[in-house]
Image (tube, grey):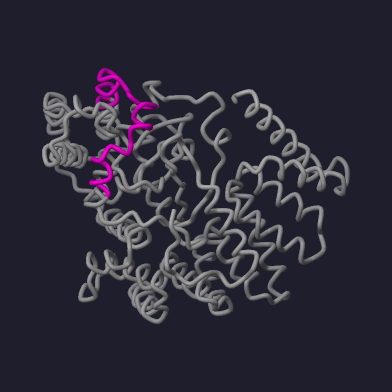
Amino acid sequence: MTRPRSAPFRTTFLSRLVAVFVALSLCLQPAVAQSVLRDAETEALFRDASAPIFKAAGFNPNAVDLILLNDGSINAFVAGGQAIYIHSGLVGAADNVNELQGVIAHELGHITGGHVIRFDEGLKPATGITVLSLLLGGLAAAAGSPDAALGVFMAGQQAALGKFLAFSRAQESSADAAGAKFLSDAGISGRGSIEFFKKLQNQEFRYGFSRRSNPDAEFYSTHPMTADRLATLQDTYEKDPAWNTPPPAELQARFLRVKAKLYGYLAEPQDTLRAYPEYLTDVPARYARAYAFHKEAFVDKALDETKALIASDPANPYFLELEGQILLESGRPAEAVAPLRKATQLTSNEPLIATTFGHALIATEDKDNFAEAEKVLKTSVARDKDNPFTWYQLGVVYEAKGDIPRARLASAEQQLMNMQLGEAVRSAEAAESALPKGTPDWLRAQDIAMSARAMMERQKKSR
């Protein structure tokens, strides 16, 4: 992974955290390092776009995780239970939210069909997790333009995952049928699904792809798109009453914002400025350029874009979040507090935004702000326990107030998620020895130590 050219964090503990995050990118399979990208706006879009599909399939929408991976290839897959993993390259290749919904419906068909590959210990506990927010931490791989992502895809760098998820043609057909039913029952057109699969087939022709010459290529290996299968799908979808139903305009607008945001975050700044030149003044263009300018440390230009975004929609929490993050990462945390506080309030303490707000309060180095930071961060971890950065900051607050046992417990939480198992055991034992016996925190310290030891033992046995 490479670090973007945005201004570095201004505090010592954040510099250390950056080093940890770079070293501990999430590996989902042996050959390709993939990191989970966390962003409040993107996750909200995924939830809202998929909710009617999940309901049509008889699932509680909150019971299926949609996880964005930092990978420029075009792919989506299921693994480790009720979780759908979506590559950033797939979002970049899609033209509308309906295409994304078609992919989600198809992958949900694999879940309902029992096609999920289950690793021995489960994906997440076996590999650990590094949470990289699109905004939080200033870390990204420069994935380039959609064309570049397709080039990487066709170059065959996805062989490892293809071997993990080489579903049979029968299973793919089953997932097709299930996905078509889910979309139909949800009143969502299958037009996007057909358009996306045709797009993939066109890329196959464009690059002269042959399964025979490259049997492990990722999406084609896991999602074989024969002409007969595509014709069957099209016939099914065209007969559906929802075929000519366009996606809701508001949902489509949100998709275009997220797509531009992701592009601006991952691509090289010069590529972003070519794709979204300054004469374009629509929201997606301003969103993408704000990231490009920020990565180049053109703070004033980046803030000009965010101010224009906020002027167009003053109550949009994600525009306010972006302004606050740019100010924070540019060494102006005191100025970042107001927009981040408002964004947190507007989203009813959305955990990722609240974490960034808590970060800004701490970064002011004003001890009067630490009580509010503690309250905000506690609320964040209560709703999302799987963000190691939140635990890190909460530990900083505890240490600043002299509550060393809870600072060690927060460190243990973070270390366990980052698979720093030895450190997690030591931190948990230190916390346990100093916390009142029988309290929830004391019990949690025991749980962390036992979990870390068990993982270490399994690692030894697997060698």
Please check the rendered image and state whether residue 426 is part of the magenta-colored stretch, yes or no: no
Could you tell whether 461 is left or right of 139 in the image? Answer: right
Horizontal side, residue 61 vs residue 109: left or right? right
Residue placed at 48% from the left, 29% from the top? 81
Give the quadrant of residue 229: top left
Indicate the position of residue 422 as horizontal and vertical percent values: 71, 41
Say if the magenta span includes residue 161. yes
What residue is rendered at 79% in x and 39% in y? 443
Between residues 325 and 293, which one lies in front from this camera angle?
293
Residue 318: image location, x then y, percent: 43, 64
Image position of 31 with respect to 458: above or below: below
Q: Which residue is drawn at 19% across and 27% down?
A: 213
* Residue 231, above or below 353: above
In this orientation, does residue 269 appear?
yes
Quadrant of the rendering where the C terminus is positioned: top right
* Residue 200: percent from left, percent from top: 19, 39
Closer to the camera in the image, 383 or 259: 259
In the image, the segment drawn in magenta is 149-177
Total marks in image = 0
- The overriding secondary structure of the stretch rendered in magenta is helix
Residue 230 image-quadrant placement: top left
In the image, 239: left or right of 283? left
Residue 34 drawn above or below residue 143 = above
Front residue of 395 and 203: 203
Residue 185: horizontal and vertical position, in percent?
28, 32
Residue 242 shows in this picture = no
Of 100 and 345, which appears nearest the observer? 100
Corner quadrant of residue 272: bottom left
